[in-house]
Amino acid sequence: MNYYSHQDATFSSLPSAPLQPPSLPPSPTSFPVSFKHTLMATPANFPQNPCEPKPHSTVGWSTGLCHCCNDISICCLTCWCPCITFGRIAEMVDRGSTSCGISGAIYLAILCVTGCSCLYSCFYRTRMRGQFLLEERPLSDCCTHCLCEQCALCQEYRELQHQGFDMSFGISNK
């Protein structure tokens, strides 16, 4: 089948050989003209993007999730008033852009209205892990907070202390 199927007056002077579309040299970013006998691209076939940051190796938490009794005062504070513990954590993770009082009030409002403050606090665990390259364990951040909110808050508080933050005085004392 000819590429140009109709006769035109401008093509009358051309040789009688069938016209073919011009062939272009293949480029790595162009798609093939004919998809016959080509393999579908899979993620394994895509080239690596040199602009993507390389994943860093992660480190473990300084204490385990269930080591709440390592610091009894924080364990008791988190058990009876988790909004204070969360507020202090959020202030450090946000690097002072939000205060302990505002973060704690948002946490308390979500807790009183929906009872699902764990969905708010799990985002701070994810941000904290990204800042300190911590492993996501024992479960995903959301599952950890939904299943054991107080233990997760205590672990994050202890980790920030381990990283050198003075949690009782705010971000200005790092």
Image (cartoon, rainbow, N blue to C red):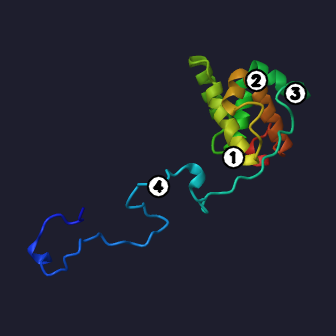
Tell me the tag on residue 137.
Answer: none
Residue at horizontal 75 percent and vertical 47 percent from the top:
133
Which is nearer the N-term, disc 2 or disc 1? 1
Circle 4 residues within 10 Å: few <14, some 14–19, many ≥20: few
Image quadrant holding the N terminus, namely: bottom left
Residue bearing the label numbered 1: 95
- The x, y position of residue 113, in whole percent, is 56, 18
Tell me the tag on residue 150.
Answer: 2
Task: For mark 3, give the secondary structure.
Answer: loop
Which is nearer the N-term, disc 1 or disc 4? 4
Amino acid type at circle 1 is Arg
Q: Which residue occupies the extreme front position in the image?
A: 16
Residue bearing the label numbered 4: 38
Residue bearing the label numbered 3: 67
Amino acid type at circle 4 is Thr
Q: How far apart are the two marked residues, 3 and 2, measured between alpha carbons?
A: 11 Å
Q: How far apart are the two marked residues, 4 and 2, measured between alpha carbons?
A: 55 Å
Residue at horizontal 70 percent and vertical 45 percent from the top:
130
Which is nearer the N-term, disc 3 or disc 1? 3
87 in relation to 9, above or below: above
Which numbered mark, 3 or 4, is in the foreground of this view? 4
Task: For mark 1, give the secondary structure.
Answer: loop
Q: Quadrant of residue 12?
A: bottom left
- The x, y position of residue 89, in whole percent, is 73, 36
Front position in the image: 171 or 68: 68
Q: How far apart are the two marked residues, 3 and 1, measured between alpha carbons?
A: 26 Å
| Relative horizontal placement of residue 142, taking residue 7 as reference (left or right) | right
Front position in the image: 110 or 43: 43
Front position in the image: 64 or 98: 64
